[in-house]
Amino acid sequence: MSVLVGLIVMLGMLVIVPLGLGLVGDPSLGRLRRLWPLFAVPGAVSLWLPRGGVATALALCYALGTLLLASHAPRRLARTRSVRPVEAALLTALVTPSVAALALVAERSGHELFGFGLGILALTVPHFHFAGFAAALVAGLVCRAEDGAAGTFAALSVPLGTLLVLVGYFVAEWTELAGAVVLTAGMWTVALLTWRTAPAPGQDRLTRVLLAVSAGVLVVTMVLALSWALGEATGLPHPTLTWMAATHGLGNALGFALCALLARRRLQHLTHPEGRTA
C-alpha cells in the first residue's frame, strides 16, 4: 500500500467515519462512536507495518468495529420499518466500511481475495470509505434536507451506483461502467443540491466555503471516475490507478468528504445548538 493511499485510508478510519456517525442522528450509534478509536487506531497502525501476522491482527481489530457498525443496519431497518430513500442511503453508509475492512484484512495478510490482487485490494479500502460510506451518508443527509425529487434521486442513485460498481468487480467491466455512470449522476445531484445550499441565509462564511468546495470538487473527481471506468471497459486511454489515487482519491477524501461532513456538522450545530452527537 502506497504512502498516499495509506494516508487517505487513515483519514477515512480516524476522521471520516466517526465524524459521519455523529451526523446520522441515531442515539444507538453513540456508544460505538465513542469506542471507534479502539478499532480505528489498530487498523491505522496496520497500514504501516509489513504484511504479515501482526498487520493482519490489527486489521482484524478494525474489521470487528466495522462489523459492529454494519450490525446496526438491520436493527435500524427493523426499528424504523422504513424503505424511504434517505434510509437506503444511511443503511448503505453503515454497511460499506465492512467491505473496506474485508479488503484491508486480505491485503494486510498478503493474500488475494476473490481473485483480486493486492494492488486492487489496497485501493478498495479507501474506495468504500469515501465512495461508499461518505458518499452514501452525504447523499442521505442531502435528501433529509431536500425532500424533493432531486434529493430522492441522489439518495437512491448513490447506493445503487456503489452496488453496481461492487458487482462489476465480479461480473464485467461494463457493469462497473454502468455503476460509475449511476454513481456519477447521483453525486453530481448531491453537488448541485449542496451548491444551492451554500448561499442560504444564516450560514457563516466558513460553512459556505466548505459546502462550495465539496460541491465543486465532486464535479471534477467524478469526471475522472467516469473516464477511468470508460477506459477500462472500452480500452480507450485513461488515467492509471496511481494517477487516480493522487487526483480522484485525494480530491474525494479532502475536497468532498472532509469538507462536506465538516460543513454538515456546522449546519447541525447551527440548527441544533445543543448538538446532536448520536
Image: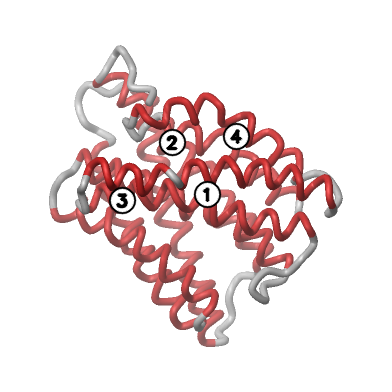
Provide residue 110's location: percent of width, then percent of height: 80, 62
Residue wearing tag 2: 20
Amino acid on which disc 1 is placed: Pro
The answer to whether residue 183 is left or right of residue 202 is: right
Q: Nearer the viewer, residue 104 or 60?
A: 60
- Whichever of labels 4 and 1 marks the residue nearer the N terminus, that label is 4
Quadrant of the image occupied by residue 14: top right
Looking at the image, which residue is at 70% across and 46% down? 59
Location of the N terminus (image quadrant): bottom right
* Residue 132 position in % (x across, y down): 46, 54
Q: Position of residue 76 (x, y in %)?
A: 32, 42
What residue sits 49% from the left and 43% below the top?
Answer: 255
Q: Are marks 3 and 2 in contact (CB under 8 Å)?
A: no
Q: State the CA–CA distance, disc 4 to disc 1.
A: 12 Å
In primary-sequence order, the first of circles 2 and 4 is: 4
The answer to which of marks 3 and 2 sits earlier in the sequence is 2
Q: Earlier in the sequence, mark 3 or mark 1?
A: 1
Could you say whether the residue bearing mark 1 is in a helix, strand or loop? helix
- Give the amino acid type for the residue marked by disc 4 in the picture: Leu
Q: Tag 2: Cα neighbours inside 10 Å, few (<14), some, or many (≥20)?
A: many
Q: Amino acid at mark 2?
A: Gly
Q: Secondary structure at mark 2?
A: helix
Distance (Cα) linking label 3 and label 2: 16 Å
Q: Return the x and y of residue 267 as percentages of the image width and height.
A: 31, 26
For the C terminus, the quadrant is top left
Q: Which residue is mark 1?
A: 97
Tell me the residue at 52%/55% (across/down).
128
Along the polypeptide, which appears first: circle 3 or circle 4?
A: 4
Could you tell me the amino acid type at mark 3? Val
Residue holding disc 4: 14
